[in-house]
Image (cartoon, rainbow, N blue to C red):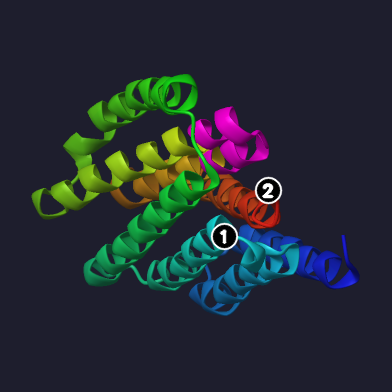
Amino acid sequence: MTQPLWTALATVVGLVLLLVFGERTGSVRNKVLIKPLTSVGFIATAVLSGCMGSVWGQWILVGLVLSFFGDVLLISSKRAAFLAGLVAFLLGHVAYVGAFYQRGIDVSGGVLPALAVGAVAIGLVARWLLPKVDKKMMRPVIAYMVVITLMVAFAGGTVAAKGQVWLLVGAVMFWLSDISVATDRFAGGGLFNRVWGLSFYYIGQLILALSSGGA
């Protein structure tokens, strides 16, 4: 890796650590300052990794940029901001689906098996979580669950077709971090839930950013 890429990675890791430790105090100022900077860091990591050299890498970049807006919007506790952040992240996942499709997928050997596993997992989550979601948010939350599961399924499809298992690892970590956010919002997940959710989110995004310059 080049020196600028190492610098970007070190910066992101440092900011993530500050963000995670900052959750102990619940400081909004900490989130307002550090979250956007951290999200810019994984965008920079993707660019420095060579994402602009392929169409699928450019789709990953679009997903990362949309995730940046989702991060900023979710800083607020207001319902309108949460819904807007949900839409931004949903579109980010759609961009990742497009990226994996552009890279190449194996439907029968990758997408369908991953979709079957994902459907069971998200079904269990939905059974537990949806009774806690208010009616106005029910449809957006269900739509989000469907899209994040499709994203993981397409990640499985592209790994089956083209290799690079880290793409699936990054996608699954992103999926898990989404469950953490939903738990925190609707079921009062607490500090531990936020810490592991943030950690999985940024590690997953970094994996996708670093992988975006590959074939």
Q: Is residue 139 depicted above or below 13 in this figure?
A: above
Q: Bin the neighbour count of mark 2 within 10 Å (Cα to Cα): few under 14, some 14-19, many 20 and up.
A: few
Q: In which quarter of the image is residue 81?
A: bottom left
Closer mark to the observer between disc 1 and disc 2: 2
Q: Quadrant of residue 83?
A: bottom left
Q: Quadrant of residue 196?
A: top right
Q: Which dot marks residue 1?
A: none
Q: Is residue 210 depicted above or below 9 in this figure?
A: above
- Which percent across, then down, holds residue 111? 43, 28
Which residue type carries mark 2? Answer: Ala
- State yes or no: residue 162 in magenta: yes
Q: What residue did someone put label 2 on? A: 215
Q: Which of 214 and 31 is in front in this view?
A: 214
Q: Which of 144 and 209 is in front in this view?
A: 209
Which residue type carries mark 1? Answer: Glu
Magenta residue span: 156-171
**Lower position in the chain sequence, tag 1 or tag 2:** 1
- State yes or no: residue 212 in magenta: no
**Residue at the location (29% across, 47% down)?**
144
**Residue at the location (55% across, 64% down)?**
58
**Residue at the location (27% across, 70% down)?**
78
Q: Is residue 12 visible?
A: yes
Q: Residue furthest left?
A: 135
Q: Which residue lies furthest to the right in this view?
A: 3
Q: What residue did someone put label 1 on? A: 23
Q: How far apart are marks 1 and 2 (CA)?
A: 37 Å
